[in-house]
Image (spheres, helix red, strand yellow):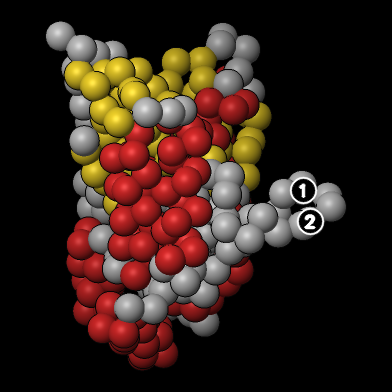
Amino acid sequence: MIREINVSEITATIKEMCIQANHFLSPDMDKALKAATENEESPLGKKILNQLQENLKIAGEDMIPICQDTGMAVFFIEIGQDVHFTGGVLEDAINEGVRQGYTDGYLRKSVVKDPLIRENTKDNTPAVIHYSIVTGDKVKITFAPKGFGSENMSRVFMLKPADGIEGVKNAILTAVSDAGPNACPPMVVGVGVGGTFEKCAIMAKKALTRETGTHSDIEYVAELEKEMLEKINRLGIGPGGLGGSTTALAVNINTYPTHIAGLPVAVNICCHVNRHIVKEL
């Protein structure tokens, strides 16, 4: 049976998500920051982590953004194949929700109309939207506003199959080491392994939206996530890049089948303000 959803409901939901995600850190990230503060070995690192938590507290109480960079709006939209949208075009409705959310929420508008001419669109649109069709009659919306301090530190490595798992480990450590303090650590590291050039990048981005503290369902991947988190935290970059034992809060890895001749790896880094929120309609 087909379920109809008016796109005005999508717009209203997107508007709410834009405002909420930029003012409140998700519970999993809040929990991870608190745990990191307790476990941080460097006195300066612990002080910085306490300041980050104070920032979150002030943002929530005063309804001001967690970070001045309120990001480019990135969405993962899972659409049940039994859903029919009415009242307009879905993509227009999503962008209208972003426009309303960023305008009415007094969030910084950071999107330029052309990558070289650089004229600001003044409403943070258009969004970057990734669609997938799934079973059922629901729509699941995952919103992740992505700031570019950390986005600019992300990398894609087109490895050879012979590079194997050690090549993947080296790629992750290289990306994080090169990012250093520029990614506003403690960071969350999203990794995509497999697929094609663009597929691994999308997987790495989506990996950042996974609940912090959870691991891959694939046993060897889960072990790799734990190993890489430990190795990253031994780099000594630390909170704010000023040294310490907490450089990353999580390493989330997604994998996908790939070609016999390739081993693509993408590393998408997010700062400690790893904003993500999920709604289902």
Q: Which residue is mark 2?
A: 118
Q: Residues within 10 Å of mark 1 (few under 14, many from 20)?
A: few
Q: Quadrant of residue 108?
A: bottom right
Q: Which residue is rendered at x = 77% and y = 47% of the image?
A: 114
Q: Is residue 254 visible?
A: no
Asked which secondary structure carries label 1, the reply is loop
Q: Are marks 2 and 1 in contact (CB under 8 Å)?
A: yes
Q: Residue at x 53, y 26 (%)?
A: 199
* Picture layout, residue 108 above or below residue 12: below
Q: Position of residue 73 (x, y in %)?
A: 49, 50
Q: Amino acid at mark 2?
A: Arg
* Left or right of 200 on screen, residue 133: left
Residue 115 shows which numbered tag? 1
Quadrant of image for the N terminus: top left
Q: Residue at x 67, y 55 (%)?
A: 121
In this rendering, does residue 262 appear at all?
Answer: yes
Residue occupying the far left of the picture: 1
- Residue 197 sits above or below residue 226 on the image: above
- Marks 2/1: CA distance? 6 Å
Q: Nearer the viewer, residue 88 or 48?
A: 88
Residue 15 placement (x, y as % from top left): 37, 53
Image position, residue 189 (x, y; %): 44, 51
Residue 138 percent coordinates (x, y): 21, 26
Q: Determine whether the residue tagged by mark 2 lies in a helix, strand or loop.
A: loop
Q: Nearer the viewer, residue 175 or 123?
A: 123
Q: Closer to the camera, 180 or 89? A: 89
In the picture, the quarter occupied by the C terminus is: top left
